[in-house]
Image: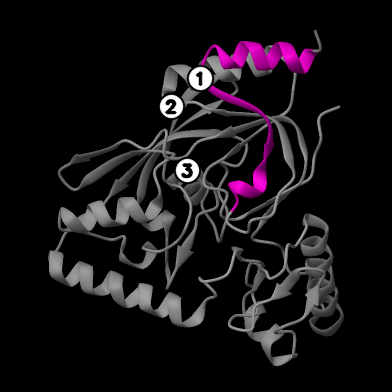
Amino acid sequence: MSSTRRVYVKLSKICETAKNVNLSKFTSNRIGGVAKIMVSPSNLEQIIKVLDVIEKAQISYVVLGNMTNVLIDDYDGVVIRIANNFDNVEIHGSKIIVESGCSLSKVCSIAMMHSLTGLEELFGIPGTVGGAVVMNAGAFGSCMENVVSCVIAICNGKITHYTNSECDFAYRHSNLQDKFVLFVQFDLKKGNKNQIQTKMMEYMSTRKNSQPLDMPSSGCTFKNIVGLPIGKLLDEDGFKGCSVGGACVSTKHANFIVNKNNATVNDVVQLIEKLQNHILLKYKVMPQTEIRIIRRKNE
């Protein structure tokens, strides 16, 4: 029996497990390779057991949520999917404690229902709370850093608590990238439910009017640079509609690459490189991707 087969058998005894999974069925951009193994643990005990099997087998793994800001090719290790199978939410006064697989928009809606303010600007950001806190997701001048007080994650096999300051938040950054986020605590404030809902709807309307939400994409392609909003520069330089294969720069927002016609991972990567080279040559800076690109294969 091959090592991959042995790992699959062991994992299938712990939680929902599948092999040779077409990842394009799960990614928001509808692009993706094949994962040799995908597991979907639904509680902390299963997560710990899954990690134990993987680490003992010395096989690579990647943790993904709703796969909204990821571009992933064939993956010969294990994809651990933490999404709506691990999404419990607890309310304690003005604090909300959330499992990392919960969608961020769901948390925003729950906060609104309990008249808790602080998450309005984040409503509509796709993806899970775990992914959002790792990348310090944000919009309209707010970000996870502003509302997260504590993160519980697995690091080097140990469950560890991280305060806000210990997360080392910065623009689209935290020090949680190499950790397995389990729970996130939000500290909010009491507010007026109707006012909170109105703000959420206003922000959502702005998103719909300015972003290609009707097309499959991974969200914003590049991180902005101080004084250089990448989408605006690409728009002014005529890159809207620019395409490579089935991948196309959105005609609505130039910092989005959409899957216009059965795009492949290579199509998107080549288009990203084309845009990066233009910005580098003209503006003398190299824009970094906000999209997480995963192309590693297990040896």
Instruction: Write down the region rendered in magenta.
Output: 3-27
What percent of the width, then of the height, locates residue 38?
62, 30
Q: Which residue is mark 2?
A: 42
Q: Amino acid type of disc 3?
A: Gly
* Image-based side of 241 in relation to 256, left or right: right
Element at badge 3?
Answer: helix
Q: Is residue 237 magenta?
A: no
In space, the residues marked 1 and 2 are separated at their CA atoms by 7 Å
Q: Amino acid type of disc 1?
A: Cys
Q: Which residue is mark 3?
A: 130
Residue at the (62%, 11%) spot, across then down: 10
Q: Which mark is residue 15?
A: 1
Image quadrant assignment for residue 77: top right
Image quadrant assignment for residue 147: bottom left
Q: Amino acid type of disc 2?
A: Ser
In this rendering, the answer to whether 243 lies above or below 259 is below
Residue at the (66%, 44%) spot, across then down: 23
